[in-house]
Amino acid sequence: MVCRRVIDYEELEVALHLPKAIYIHPLSRPQVENYSTKAGKPLEGVRITLDNDSTLWELLKTPLMLDVAALTYQNPTAFVLRFLLWRYNYAPLNYVHFLDYAAERLFLRKVGGGYIFIHRMLLEYFASREPEVGKARPS
């Protein structure tokens, strides 16, 4: 996969010959407003900021950046913490998938909206293990 801004790509001396390409058009202001309105209260911060910041409007014209802003405004601390834990190999990026996987293999049991270890000895075993500190994922 190659990601490139169209203007930069057109200025290349040697163009890449690809069998297929997808062009993602910038989002319009109404599309961004519609997305943030439909999301409701969690994205209220995005809507308020957009009303006062023209630079942010330019940034959020791409679907990827709009999604990043949405995740950040919903719960910035949790988002950053999850990313850092994943980056330094302390935890998976997708906790729900990981926890469901562990429950399917009978390490965990779903209880209400959470999970518990199937046996106290298993909990104690994992709690006693030393983490491998400082081994970051490759960039």
Image: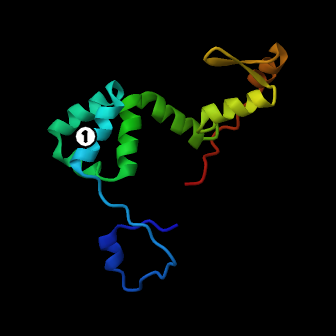
Give the left or right position of residue 36, taking residue 64 as reference. Answer: left
Which residue is the site of mark 1?
33
40 relative to 80 in the view: left or right = left
In the rendered view, would you say 33 is above or below 138? above
Vertical order, 113 against 102 (above or below)? above
Q: Nearer the viewer, residue 94 or 83?
A: 94
Q: Position of residue 112 (x, y in %)?
A: 64, 14
Residue visible at 75% across and 27% down? 103
78 and 108: which one is in front?
Answer: 108
- Determine whether, in the image, residue 34 is placed left or right of residue 122: left
Q: Residues within 10 Å of mark 1 (few under 14, many from 20)?
A: some
Vertical arrangement, residue 17 with respect to residue 45, above or below: below
Q: Quadrant of residue 124?
A: top right
Secondary structure state at the residue bearing disc 1: helix
Rendered view: 112 above or below 58? above
Res. 106 image quadrant: top right
Which residue is depicted at the point 17% across and 46% down? 54
Q: What scheme was used to colour the molecule?
A: rainbow
Give the amino acid type for the residue marked by disc 1 in the picture. Answer: Glu
Q: Residue at x 33, y 33 (%)?
A: 38
Outermost residue toward the bottom?
Answer: 14
The image shows residue 56 at horizontal and vertical percentages of: 24, 45
